[in-house]
Image (spheres, helix red, strand yellow):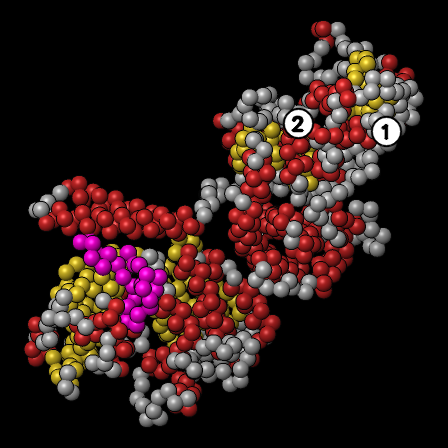
Amino acid sequence: MNAEEIQAIFFAECEESLVAAEQGLAACRDGTHDADTVNAVFRAVHSIKGGAGAFGYVALQAFTHTFETLLSDVRDGTVPITEPLVDLLLRALDTLSDHVSAARGESAPPEDAVLQAELTAAMAANAGVPPAPAPEAAPHTAPHPAEGAGSDNGAGDFDLDFDLDALLDDISGEIAPKAEAQAADEPRWQMRLRPHAAAMRNGSEPLLMLREMGDLGGRCEACDISAVPPLDALDVGTGYLGWTFSFPASVTEAAVRDIFDFVGDDCALAFGDDAPMPPIRYPEQPAAARPAPAPTSSGLAAAASAQTPAAAPAVHGAAAAVPGSPASALAAPAAGSAPPAPPAPGQSIRIELGKLDKLIDAVGELVIAQAMMAQRLAGQGLAVAEEMAMIEGLTRDIQESAMAIRAQPIGSVFSRVPRILRELAASTGKHVKLEVSGESTELDKTVIERLGEPLTHLIRNAVDHGIEPADQRLAAGKPAEGTLTLSAEHRSGRILIRIADDGKGIDRERVFAKAVEKGLIAPDAVLSKEEIDLLIFAPGFSTAQQVTNVSGRGVGMDVVRQNVKDLGGRITIDSEPGKGTTFTLTLPLTLAISDGMVVNVGDQTLVVPLANVVESLRPAPNEVQGLGVNRCMINVRGRFIPVIPLARAVGAEGAATDPVDAVLIVVETEGAGRAALMVDAICDQRQVVIKSLDTHYRSVEGVAGATILGDGRVALIVDVDGLVSRSLASAGAATPLAEAA
Amino acid sequence: MSNPTRILTVDDSPSMRALLNHALSGHGFDVAQAEDGLAALDWLAMNEVDVVITDINMPRLDGFGLIERLREGSRHRDRPILVLTTESSDEKKARARAAGATGWIVKPFDPEKLVAAVRRVAH
């Protein structure tokens, strides 16, 4: 794993954290939060900060620090949760999201100075400790310098903390001169050390320190065993020894101190030839003392001689009390030790997408191989082999499992909606309540990634054009606040996503007028309600009176429809004047495999995506009506549908030319309504692995891709929408499909 | 000394776990990962380890709680436990100390220092 991969993990984690924070803050806003909600938000921001520091995203780190500090106050209850505060936190979250994008290199870093000041003000304002900040307040309001990348705190300041970080700076092999290297007659100086009795209970091992001192050139001159109790009173977990070490003059005191820095107050040190051995300290006594930086406490000598716990108070008194000593903190851990455990989140592992795609590819090949084998066995009269049925079932299982790995809950897309609505509320003044359902519905990762843009556009559109301003709503007897409902559900192998608003509905008169004005339809055209609604998807159509910065961004609803279509999906509208509009997106679960109908057309075999197929039928002679020279319509239960000879569209030879001799497949298209594809025969209905034609050949109009059939032949998958609208537009023109085949 | 030092890293952040893993595995340590205190306890119930490196703020069971639980039992009473966190306040350090942490490393960490720290506490 290299740095880039870890970075990718970090950004994925940022997304998750942002979602978690968003949800937590939403709960705070709705008043459904508890103590853990705030902590979860804190943790989310905190974890972004941690990674930001590690990867050196300074701006992101600085902002998360301020954000986190305020959240910490909120978590601790020193800042109450109020509406303005939640609003501030939500805005901070939006900016944080922008910072993350900036760190990814997707955008410029946001201007956050004002917001930072607001966040800081929120802490100070509620801290109850007006201007005169406590000493520790300063590092709270600004990024701690020591936390920047490459911190170098601790240089020179001897704060016997157990902060390993900075203090290990200069300790490594090469600066540990071997004792032999030292001149034998070099003058030596002495120091004494005594680990506290309880040092070993913290996992410290004094022996390791002694070894390090040895490596530095230190020599043990004496071991103080005066504290060792009689055998029957000896506790194996307690340290009783102290040592006197001597060092050559070339070894500095600081170098020796470094060894002990990280054990903090687990070990008392005394430097100088005449320094007394520090007294032993027992665990019963509050370990409040930091070892004195210089051997000044001669008074300790007396105490040292009485190696009993009773002597402890003298030590205590001689040393400066340190705030936040273990004694005072002892009560605190109880809070952190047993938080009510929420249900365990599902165990998960992260997989590199490339590996997954390889698996999906292999599964695709497996599906093909299985089909080929089935076909061969059938050729030898073994079609009913039981094992074959088992393999077929297993193949399907494997395929579904592999697809499920690529599937992600749509919640990751939905979770961005609150922010969009907040921004819209700010720019349009329309406050919209969001209702979401089915956010755990899973669909393919690629589909999810490409769904964001059309969904965003539809939501902007709903708020901008659908939902009325508050005064109009009140006049219409609706609540002032509009409602946007987002839902997702599985339905027969596809995903339905609905975006519904309770606004004014589509103004069909205006849409009609606009379409006429744009030259999209004739002024005297007679259109059904649905057809008028669909006009808003026509390229170049925009009903916004003036171009707003909300929906009038140059891209129209036609782009939305194109996006959805590219995903193999469909979009439909259901609008009722005064009540609202619902957009329904129907999307496939995956882009890699789909159900298809395998058909024969003359000398060619083609695949028609099942998603488009409505029905198939053999027409009776009286149901077919000629139209012009070589076009005809078929009457399907009183409705006339154009017949499109697939053979002509793809240039196949030897196909049936009379609909009565052929099979008609009625398909539903986006742009051209229903049509009937004329084929010779339907041979199979199966899952096909879609191979892109673009990558292997080039994009061909009317062809969605290719697949490999059971017998190993390549078959083209028909792009029904493209093919039908093209055929209807120019019946009998040259066929690009033919050249691809 | 023939067996590599076994380290359990406990952090709810996958990227931090990956960074730790990256920094430590490269130096011949045997690294296991847990995503929070409870997961760490589960793992430790079945596995042996030489050093534990833990984050503080984690869901379910935080670092303080983990250290306390480990110190309660005899098996991990002497286990070196390093605390790794961005929260560098004295109060937090004192709490970690009181819970029984062996040492403290501030995030973001320098990989070399981290390795030196682990070497230093590994028994």
Q: Residue at x 24, y 51 (%)?
A: A368
Q: Which mark is residue B121?
A: 2
User: Type of residue at label 1?
Assistant: Ala
Where residue B98 sits in the image (x, y, percent)?
71, 31
Is residue A597 within the magenta segment?
no
Q: Is residue A333 left or right of residue A379?
A: right
Q: Residue furthest bottom?
A: A524
Q: Residue at x 61, y 36 (%)?
A: B54
Q: Residue at x 69, y 47 (%)?
A: A149
Asked which quadrant contains residue A566, the reply is bottom left
Q: How many marks?
A: 2
The quadrant of the picture occupied by the C terminus of chain A is: bottom left
Q: Give the labeled residue for mark 1.
A: A292
The subunit letter for the residue under badge 1 reads A
User: Type of residue at label 2?
Assistant: Val
Q: Is residue A104 left or right of residue A111?
A: left
Give the magenta part as a residue range. Answer: A689-714
Along the line of sight, the residue nearer the viewer: A557 or A205: A205
The subunit letter for the residue under badge 2 reads B
Where residue B115 sits in the image (x, y, percent)?
64, 34
The verdict on a common chain for dots 2 and 1 is no
Asked which quadrant contains residue A205, the reply is top right
Is residue A708 within the magenta segment?
yes
